[in-house]
Amino acid sequence: MTYVFNRAPQASLAVVDSEKRFPVRRVFCVGRNYGAHAREMGHDPDREPPFFFTKPADAVFDMPDNWPYPPETNDLHHEIELVVLIGKGGANIEKANANEHIFGYAVGLDMTRRDLQGVAKKLGRPWDWGKAFDFSAPCGPVHPVSETGIIEQGSIWLEVNGKSRQSGDIADLIWSVPEVIEIISRSMKLQAGDVIMTGTPAGVGAVVRGDKISAGIDRLGKIETMVS
Ligand code: MN
């Protein structure tokens, strides 16, 4: 097969203690998956089924030292998330078997142009311009589940310039990782390489150029970047 021009590089993430990389296929993101965050966004978490949005594969990349501030926003928000990397695909996966489909986990940021997302919400338009922009999902290295075990609890946190912004526990996910895998795979056949960003705890807020973001999840280490 030859193409009319050189195809773009495969989006991928580093895997800890390995020369190999995780090839990214699609990126599914869960909206409002921690009760306190749903409430801070003006919703009742007890009454809503989960919903999803997506990002392009190449929005995912290794967390850089300097993360580029995107265009067309004056209200750029951080969202720390547990990222689940699918290693084995399937349709109609049952939650009891869902963990077998996980290759590993990473710490990731669902960076959000909140002002553009707000306009989209108000007008009933898609969220893509708020959520799916270039470099919108920087992630730390992938930790294989063979090393971490299944992650069902543990602290998830984010600091800006050394001050705590977000703090939560994976155990507080409204829809657990196995439930999310079950629900997505009912609508679309999951494939190896698919990435799931599982939602963010309360405390989202704006960052500006020069801010230093540090964030981590128990067993997955810490990521750091400067908004540049
Ligand atoms: Mn999010």
Image: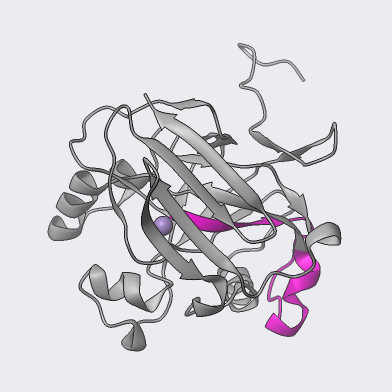
The residue located at (42%, 30%) in the rendering is 226
Residue at image point 85% right, 37% down: 18
Tell me the quarter of the image containing the C terminus.
Answer: top left
Is 14 in front, or is 11?
14
Q: Which residues are magenta?
A: 80-101
Q: Residue furthest bottom?
A: 46
Nearest the camera: 160 or 70? 160
Q: Quadrant of the N terminus?
A: top right
Quadrant position of ligand 1: bottom left
Residue 81: percent from left, percent from top: 50, 57
Residue 110 coordinates in the image, percent (x, y): 43, 49
Residue 199 placement, left or right of 82: left
Q: How many marks?
A: 0
In the rendered image, residue 184, in percent from the top left (x then y), is placed at: 57, 69
Left or right: where 142 falls relative to 72:
right
Q: Quadrant of residue 25?
A: top right
Residue 33, quarter of picture: bottom left
Query: Left of 67 or right of it: where is 192?
Result: right
Q: Residue 13 appears at what percent x and percent y?
A: 68, 37
Q: Residue at x 47, y 80 (%)?
A: 174
